[in-house]
Amino acid sequence: MARPAKAADVSTFAGAVANRIRTRRKRLGLTVEGAATTAGVPAATWYGWENCHSGVPLSRLPAIAAALGCGPSQLLPAKWSAVGSRQEAVGRE
């Protein structure tokens, strides 16, 4: 039986996702406004995600990843991304 997530686990996960989104966007030279527009969300929402003022809804991860030119699993911390990579591969079959 899986243990429930601790608050620290959740905040660490959220912070890692936010950092990966921000790092990827900056590496690509995109503005928050440009990335947000491409993902179909207001810039204020994107700012909130990058600064951990609001959590990134998993349902939005594919749109965020597309705006950043990567797969959703690339935005997840390493210990979760292996699962995401397998799920993405299965989804393409």
Image (cartoon, grey):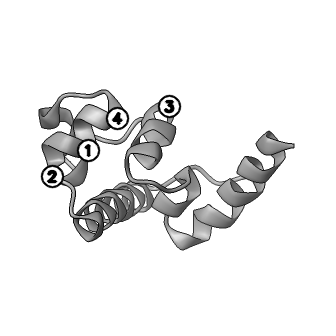
Distance in Å between CA atoms under marks 4 and 1: 6 Å
Disc 1 + disc 3, Cβ < 8 Å: no
Determine if residue 1 is in view: no
Q: Position of residue 31 (x, y in %)?
A: 15, 52
Q: Which residue is mark 2?
A: 31
Q: Is residue 22 above or below residue 39?
A: below
Residue 16 in which image quadrant: bottom left
Q: Are marks 4 and 1 in contact (CB under 8 Å)?
A: yes
Callout 3: SS: helix
- Check disc 4 and report the residue beneath it: 39
Residue 43 lies in what quarter of the image?
A: top left
Residue 63, position as x, y percentages in the image:
44, 37
Q: Tell me the number on the disc at residue 59.
A: 3
Label 1 to label 2, Cα distance in Å? 6 Å
| Residue 6 in view in this figure | yes
Q: Nearer the viewer, mark 4 or mark 3?
A: 4
Q: Residues within 10 Å of mark 4 (few under 14, many from 20)?
A: many
Task: Where is residue 81? Give x, y as percent.
Answer: 61, 63
C-alpha span from label 2 to label 3: 22 Å
Q: Count residues near mark 1 (Cα–Cα under 10 Å), then give few for <14, some for 14-19, many for 20+.
A: many
Labels in figure, total: 4
Q: Earlier in the sequence, mark 4 or mark 2?
A: 2
Q: Is 79 on the left-hand or right-hand side of 57?
A: right
> In the rendered structure, which disc, 2 or 3, sits on the residue that comes first in sequence?
2
**Quadrant in which the C terminus is drawn:** top right
Count neighbours of disc 3 (C-alpha within 10 A) and say few if under 14, some if 14 to 19, many if 20 or more. Answer: few
Is mark 1 in CB contact (under 8 Å) with mark 2?
yes
Give whichever of 39, 18 is nearer the camera.
39
The residue mark sitting in front, 1 or 3, is 1
Q: Residues within 10 Å of mark 2 (few under 14, many from 20)?
A: few
In percent of the image, x 54 and y 51: which residue is there? 72
| Circle 1 residue | 35
